[in-house]
Amino acid sequence: MPNTRIIGQQLAVFAGPSPATGSQPSGSMVQLYRNQGVSMDWQITRQNINQIGDLSPISQEILDSPNVTMDTSWSVSNLRNESGVGFYITTSPANQSGCLTNIINGTQDTKNYYIKLAPQGQDANRYAGTDCAVIAIGNANIASYSTSAAVGGLPTSNLSVAGLNVEYDTSCSGVDSPAINPNNGVNVVGTYTLPPGSTGVAGQTTVLRPGDLRLSMRQGGADYVGLGISTVCIQSYQFNFSLALEPQQCLGSRFPTNRYATFPVEITATIEAQVKDFGSGSLASLLCNDREVDIIVTLADPACGTGIGADKVRFSMLGAKPTSQPFVGGIQGNSTVTFNFTSLIGGPTDTSHNFIMSGSIA
């Protein structure tokens, strides 16, 4: 039965295994749980072909490969989604391997992504049939990632990927792979099958709450509360980084043979707070004593009473340097301060400058 409209009830998002080539059975797919939305776009750049004697171009030719993008977001309940899209997740904060470990070593850098559409009136997370449609993005790499939380809202992560191809299919079982051979643009040999959607894995927390969140800024073993600030009430945080993908284009190839992250990868942190009290400090002294700050956010399982649940997610930004600290005060409302930091994501064993994701994937 054809659809007359498409709503969120019908949609589910999956990430395939790496590499993107070859057959991908349903058991190798990872559903992105707690998804809040997904968007996809493709763009083609054309170049005018002109010659004297003609006012208008005689043709508009495609010289560059198409640019396919997908953006999606989810409420944070664990790090299963981050693991599924290729980030390295440590199970213990003692393991200081950076989140880009699998991207750097090439084991999880290129994937296919799938937007599944269940029939009208069906929940995608309960529909087990094959009468579905799929938007399949082939040869995709992570382009950017951010994660944030604020008072009065749920912790959320956002992901953007860039691919080489997109296919629109009217089935989700035994369909030709969207991955292509970059040399000629021909689809690789292999098929994919999407599994039935589900609301989560067994025992998965529904969602993590900002009330169960702890944020610390540490500088040289002591708490850091900014320059000239004594005490604050944290209102929000956001970590953000972009991989600035650089296409490797070769003569004789219609598409980039790969898209590599441009290093160094810079990560930024923005922390907004209400100011409780001023303290002492001097900007001039920062110039000769420019020490680094470690910013750690821990999200715990919801717990009853006065106790704190088990830690589920931990984001650690190591070696951050402050870049600005705007203060705003006015007639109405609380005075606020924004702490802006920047750091660099290092190699897998860099314990001084990195962004580390640790916690549960179940």
Image (cartoon, rainbow, N blue to C red):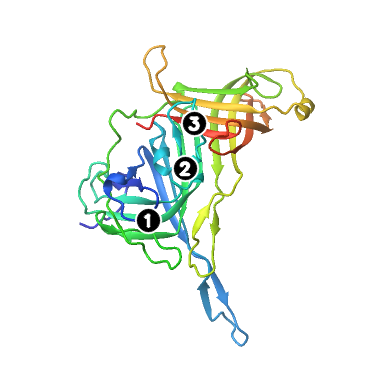
Amino acid bearing label 2: Asn
Residue indicated by mark 3: 149
Tell me: residue 265, above or below residue 334. below
149 on left or right of 333: left
The residue tagged 2 is: 102
Q: Is residue 331 above or below residue 137?
A: above
Question: Where's residue 210, x and y in %?
Answer: 46, 25
Instruction: Identify the element where label 3 is drawn.
Output: strand
Nearer mark to the viewer, of 2 and 3:
2
Residue 59 coordinates in the image, percent (x, y):
52, 78
Task: Determine which of the numbered discs, if any, sits on residue 198 in the image.
Answer: none
x and y, in percent, of residue 54 in the image? 59, 85
Pick the residue in front: 121 or 297.
297
Q: Quadrant of the N terminus?
A: bottom left
Q: How far apart are marks 1 and 2 (CA)?
A: 17 Å
Q: Which residue is drawn at 42% across and 60% down?
A: 165
Q: Residues within 10 Å of mark 2 (few under 14, many from 20)?
A: some
Dot 1 falls on a residue whose secondary structure is loop
Q: Using residue 121 as the reference point, say whether residue 69 is left or right of it.
A: right
Residue 2, relative to residue 215: is it above or below?
Answer: below
Along the viewing direction, whichever of 47 and 195 lies nearer the viewer:
195
